Amino acid sequence: MTLRRALYALPVILIGLFAYLAWLGLAPDRDPSALPSALVGKPVPQFSLPPLDAAADKLSSADVTGHVTVLNFFASWCLPCKAEHPLLFSLGQDYGVPVYGIAFKDRPEDTAAYIKEMGSPYKKIGLDVDGRVSIDFGLTGVPETFILDKNGVVRYRLSQPLDEDTIQSDIAPLLQSLQQ
Amino acid sequence: MIAEIGHYALVLAFALALAQSVLPMIGAQRGIRPWMAFARPAAFAQLAFVGLAFLMLVACFVRSDFSVAIVYEHSHSLQPLIYKIAATWGNHEGSLLLWVLILAIFGALVALFGENLPPRLKARALSVQGMIGFAFLAFMLFTSSPFERLNPAPLEGQELNPLLQDPGLAMHPPMLYLGYVGFSMTFSFAVAALIEGRVDAAWARWVRPWTLLAWTTLTAGIFLGAHWAYYELGWGGWWSWDPVENASFMPWLVGTALLHCETVVEKRDALKVWTILLSIVAFGFSLIGTFLVRSGIITSVHAFAQDPARGLFILAIFAVALGGSFTLFAWRAPQLQPGGLFAPISREGALVLNNLLLGVGAGTVLIGTLYPLALSVITGGTVSVGAPWYASTFVPLMMPMVLLMAIGPLLGWKRGDLPGALQRLAVAGLLALVAAGLVYRQETGGSVLAPLGIALGVWLFLGTLMEWIERVKLFRAAPRENWNRARHLPRAAYGMTLAHLGLAVAIVGMTASSAWKVESVQVMKPGDSITIGDFAYRFDGVAPAQGPNYIAERATFTVTRDGKPYTLLYPERRQYEVQEQPTTEAAIQSSIRGDIYAVIGDHAGPQSWTVRIYHQPLVPWIWVGGLLMALGGLTSLSDRRYRIGVPNRLPVVQATGA
């Protein structure tokens, strides 16, 4: 009889479990659309891109290996890129890391006009006009920012614009630990 | 002013819902007649106020009153009128109002047609209905008011999401909600019956029309949604096991089980506890669906904007409604008198097996839907559960179900004659095997499931026909007697026949379109041709086209079959002016053999486009099957015994503890 009673109580218990799971799932710091990057922990994809300045060298994967670097994908037609642009300067100046830029699906003349207007936080800029290299990086949109360690291994990916909070909480500690 | 009237009406409905949930319940407990009778006018007034609020919101959309926040966010003055109206429920707040409106309609219908319900049961059921209304009105007023104003008012709106600017939006959500909310009615009746401590044949007969109505509309809603996804999203499929699709499918599975075991309660006074459980679970799944879509806990094509406060609110509603009703269940259900006995091989036995298979099927879908969530919450990992999981769990469960569907109706109540039934199905079985053999021979490298699926469809179709033939004594009696028998079969019997035939047709369509879909993607320049099967497609070029609120590139394909002209296809790629989101409009030419389906994609270079062409065998059969199933539900709903009063022919069964 008690077993039968327990059986009748089973639905309540299941509902309780579901409610607990759902409650955990609703935690405000959980982002259901967050995608772990398959690249994190892997070596940076091989690439070689034409430079913005015709006189400069190509931007290639060799440039971003050997020291800690920040790699930023941007485009002149991308408004959030404009918003994060000043923060890229401070990344380079305050933390002493070279910042490299890749212009995603952008006409070279537009990229040039954009850089002329906004100034360049980048040590070097590569042009990914047809978006091929961006596919290798698994880019979901612009802007996106990658941090690579000394061995050229991707350690961090941010698929949204940079902001002060993220730099303080995630990026700054990571850069410091990588540079030691 | 219009928005304020709407908001005020909602507040009144909210206060009224509170009274409707409390007074009739206490009245029924203490035997105070006027308090019990209050439920009826309260349910009507509820409909009047919520209906008024809904009309006011529609008016705001029609007049493009951009000072109302959701009108600004989801409408535009250039949008065609039908999409201005449909935009009313093309967003979280408005669709919630539609949800509550349908809830109020169901409440009013029970008050209207419930003349012959026992007053206590009616008072309690309407009281529970009032509680659900109260909870959702509170949710709307406190977290998602549709009548929020903007100051200053913007001059122009942001337009409805282009994917939603489609006749599908006008039909799919209202149908689906009729189904979801319809199960609230069976839920209310189940809770009322638990409080009364009494479930009998009469109870089953009162509840059954509501279950049928909910099931029919949910069926129609799901098929409409699948059809919409098929022609609008342009990826060539009709079902993707998306969490939100599953959220509508799970209540359907449980609702189907419920529909079948209600007949057992009605005819044989057995399976009562199980029926009550299913009534609660069916609505529980509707609530889980509401929670998954509106809380932002998962990402899906259907999900509304995220807001954790809303999620917590719905979770609270869910926990109180289901926690409460299941606690009541644990307390009262053991006291329900067990009913009639039956042998394992009998109509009842077959229905129990049907219930088990459908229940476990719903369970596998639930696990597939919640597993990624559980994993991400517990370990932080990400995983997606897709078609392969369902193909290896859900599909094998449904195969014996379909096999059984042809046999069950041929078994007698109480004790069935299985060898006799199988003998009568010999022809159907033989033809099904022949069909499987033919398909197997014809097939070149397709799935092994395909011959099996086709055979099951043929088996179910012929087996269902056989049952009807048996009933009218076709070939065994004079034509005059056949005719008389056919005329006097209850409509519920025809409902079953139609619905089962519909599923058979749909199974054949689903199997064929999954197994033999041909997809061809390539870059084409004007003048290029490709050949798929008997059909040749010549790409004639792309011309600009102008819609009311979009510009489009319209491609022209000349299709020939065996060299003879067949049809012209005009797939479009639209760019909506405000949302700047491109959408594809597939061009589809249907025939009984299947659809040819063309989509035009991105520019692949100067004067060349990415073109996708699909051959979708037998896809129209899916829609025809769905239509037949919904028609079956309607036919059954029109059965005479739901229109006349309920004869109280069975002795009333009292709970021992009440």
Image (tube, grey):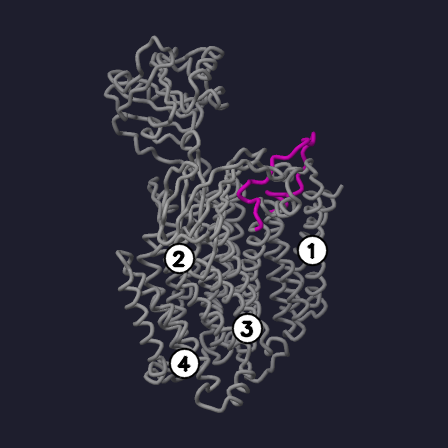
Tell me the quadrant of the picture where the C terminus of chain B can be found.
bottom right
Residue with the mark numbered 4: B410
Tell me the quadrant of the picture where the N terminus of chain B can be found.
top right
Mark 2 closeness class: few <14, some 14–19, many ≥20 residues within 10 Å = many
Image point 68% across, 68% down: which residue?
Answer: B112
Q: Is residue B323 above or below residue A66?
A: below
Q: Chain of mark 2?
A: B
Q: Helix, strand, or loop for circle 2?
A: strand
Outermost residue, bottom side: B478
Q: Helix, strand, or loop for circle 1?
A: helix
The residues tagged by marks 4 and 3 sit, at their Cα atoms, a distance apart of 19 Å
Q: Is residue B302 above or below residue B262?
A: above
Residue with the mark numbered 1: B16
- Numbered disc in front, either 4 or 2: 2
Label 3 near label 1: C-beta < 8 Å? no
Residue B636's label in the rendered image is: 3
Outermost residue, top side: A55
Label 1 near label 2: C-beta < 8 Å? no
| Circle 4: residue type | Leu
Q: Please report the bounds of the magenta region as a residue range.
A: B140-167
Mark 4 closeness class: few <14, some 14–19, many ≥20 residues within 10 Å = many
Q: Earlier in the sequence, mark 2 or mark 1?
A: 1
Labels 4, 2: one chain: yes
| Circle 2: residue type | Pro
| Circle 3: residue type | Ser
Q: Position of residue B17 (x, y in %)?
A: 66, 56
Labels 1, 4: one chain: yes
**Magenta region's main secondary structure?**
loop
Where is residue B578, by image quadrant? top right
